[in-house]
Image (tube, helix red, strand yellow):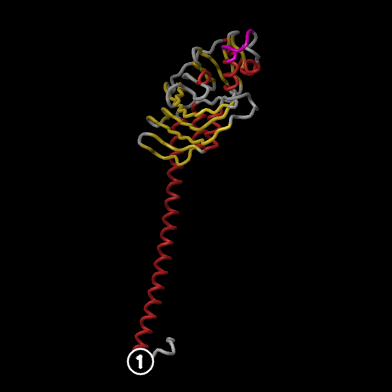
Amino acid sequence: MFPVPSSEKISPNQAVLRGFHVTAEACQGSTNLQRNAKTMKTTILLGGVLLCATSLIAADAASDVKAAAKKLSNNYSWKSTSESAGGGGGGGNRNRMGGPTEGKTDAGVTQLSMTRGENTVEAVLKGEKGAIKTEEGWKSLSEAAAAGGDGGGGGGGRGGAARFTARTLQSYKAPAAEVEDLIGKAKDLKKDGDAYAGTLGAEDVKALMSRGFGRPGSNAPEVADAKGSVKFWTKDGALSKYQYNVQGKMTFNNNDVEINRTTTVEIKDVGTTKLNVPEEAKKKLS
């Protein structure tokens, strides 16, 4: 029953003891396998529970922020600023992107005042239409974006900045719409102190970094090592501030630029904002 070398002689009692020993080892091995299987099942179960819990937390956080953004309704004001690590605004395009933007929106009309270097650019948006104030007066966004030189007199200068800004404004999103877009992009969104925080995927960061560069339809700048994050703050259940950071190496016009830019948008005057749109701008919106 329990083979032994032919040269070895054992007594009946020794054979019985050897049998008990082998049987005990087999039982122990079976017990260990059962324990390992049980441990593995428990680990898989806990992992699934944690994954579900994380997904639910992210979903709840996203729902909370969406609800807070909706409380802005169609009437609020804001101030947006962009800062690069080491100072300055906008990263590799400071002269065009730097400086704060102050905005107001009411009943579907958005009024903007944008500081770009030493200049201030005014614009009004309504749906897919918009108007921008140039040195030659108010122009529709399509007119200003298509203008050559400085819009008719000279080459570049403030007219060139207005042309660039007009092209950028053609895809502009007011805070409520931008927040909804950022929520859809945010990963691992969760409550973090007094804010909701999450990360941004590489492709989404590239899109944010490339926004405003080049002509519509042209190739976007190349971006390497892209990473980013986003935060949302609420007050009394309504969105009060949000912030996103984008980092990476951008290649534009054969130049490599390291970008580490943080954009902060602060909301105010919810429900009490009033617009004062010039008549010339209104005509361009019709």
State left or right for residue 11 relative to residue 129: left
Q: Which residue is mark 1?
A: 11
Q: Position of residue 167 (x, y in %)?
A: 60, 21
Q: What amino acid type is highlighted by mark number 1?
A: Ser
Quadrant location, the C terminus: top right
Secondary structure found at label 1: loop
State left or right for residue 70 relative to residue 235: right
State left or right for residue 14 relative to residue 123: left
User: Which span of residues is magenta-colored?
Assistant: 153-160
Q: Position of residue 266 (x, y in %)?
A: 42, 24
Camera-nearest residue between 270 and 94: 94
Camera-nearest residue between 93 and 186: 93
Residue 210 is inside the magenta segment:
no
- Residue sitting at x 36%, y 34%: 194
- Residue sitting at x 45%, y 25%: 84
Q: Position of residue 249 (x, y in %)?
A: 52, 32
| Residues packed near mark 1 inside 10 Å, few (<14), some (14 to 19) or many (20 plus) | few
- Residue sitting at x 59%, y 9%: 137
